[in-house]
Image (spheres, helix red, strand yellow):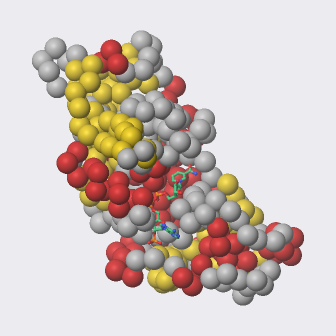
Amino acid sequence: MTESGASFSAWQVRELEVDGKRRYLGSLIERKLAELPPGDVLIRVLYSSLNYKDALSAAGNRGVTRHYPHTPGIDAVGEVLHSEVATVVPGSRVIVTGYDLGMDTDGGFAQRIRVPAHWLVPLPEGMSPFDSMAYGTAGLTAALCVQRLLHNGLTPEAGAVLVTGASGGVGTLAVALLAHLGFRVHASTGKPESADLLRSLGADEVLPREELALAEERPLLKERWAGAVDVVGGRVLAHVLKSVRAGGSVACCGLVGSAELPVSVFPFILRGVNLLGVDSVNIPLQDKAVIWQRLAGEWKLPDLSALSHEIGFDALPSALDALLAGQSTGRTVLRV
Ligand SMILES: NC(=O)c1ccc[n+]([C@@H]2O[C@H](COP(=O)([O-])OP(=O)(O)OC[C@H]3O[C@@H](n4cnc5c(N)ncnc54)[C@H](OP(=O)(O)O)[C@@H]3O)[C@@H](O)[C@H]2O)c1
């Protein structure tokens, strides 16, 4: 950061043409404040975090980011430097997740962001900036999934709850949160080496990913779980819907496996299974604020250190590659 404060460091992805093919290359550059998009509030970013969507944006996925050069980072926590609105006070600490941040609006992989005031949630009392990004969009999503399951009548007495993609960001936080709330948790993972971590977060059982990913013609399977949080989609989500007990619910929030859903209507019409769609990006700010308060209060996880680690800009490219390949474990917090 220069003394005048007019320029700042940002990790920017550029589109290049190499041997007739499009390539996307990220690097740390100096930017001017004047280059940031218009917005009510200028924020000094303290931490960001890595989500699957950031890996897609950094890899040139047009479903996430249409225009390059671009700075990814759908999450940020920081300090307000300048505000055009009376309700947001300079010096206060705020969280921004979702909406257009890091998609087509320059995101949190930078020392400064400028955003509309209606994207900001105050950093809750008792939550450190680091912890807010250890949760990040993944934690908000995991908590929204749990909230929807509870709202649809899931109780610890009803039986075990399954989490798929359990070693990832949403997965680890869903496992930890459900266990914290007294549920028996089954964790499905493609990484046998993450079994100890998942057990330490509270999983009672760890299942190999292949068990749920087999092509299965039968319209219904043995009733096994009272509910589930699914980040995978595709065959895995189909298998889960066929295996949830009568009246149970499945919160669906991701598509790392597939965006398709090869399932018949039988789980819904013969067992009354509920498929609950969860979006953490574009929901009203007030709904996000309620979840953040909960994560700082009665749902606060005692220790996020087992599932989160901190990196700097130097480790960002390899961390994004690992995320895209499904090789990442837990939550990666970017020190900005
Ligand atoms: N709806 C929303 O608002 C919302 C918000 C946040 C995230 N999401 C979505 O949720 C998903 C997970 O996000 P994340 O940030 O947790 O990502 P992540 O940290 O990369 O975790 C995804 C996990 O899924 C598993 N996985 C990866 N590739 C797979 C494949 N081909 N088949 C089956 N499982 C696979 C891996 O866990 P294991 O090795 O343990 O199986 C991986 O660690 C993404 O699709 C993301 O876009 C949605």
Q: In this view, does 293 lie above or below 204?
A: above
Which residue is drawn at the image coordinates 58% and 60% (left, top)? Answer: 255
Q: Which residue lies furthest to the right in this view?
A: 269
Q: Answer with left or right where residue 256 lies relative to residue 216.
A: left
x, y percent for residue 273: 77, 69
User: How far across and down, in percent of the image, does residue 145 sit?
Assistant: 58, 57
> In percent of the image, x 84 and y 69: which residue is there?
265
Q: Nearer the viewer, residue 126 or 227?
A: 227
Quarter of the view holding residue 38: top left
The answer to which quarter of the image holds residue 173 is bottom left
Q: Nearer the viewer, residue 96 or 329?
A: 329
Q: Can residue 281 be seen in this view?
A: yes
Left or right of 200 in this view: 4: left
Q: Position of residue 11 (x, y in %)?
A: 29, 37
- Name the quarter where the C terminus is drawn: top left
Residue at figure coordinates x 37%, y 50% from the top left:
50
Asked whether the viewer can see residue 146, the reply is no
Give residue 228's position: percent from left, percent from top. 61, 69
- Depth check, front residue: 285 or 215: 215
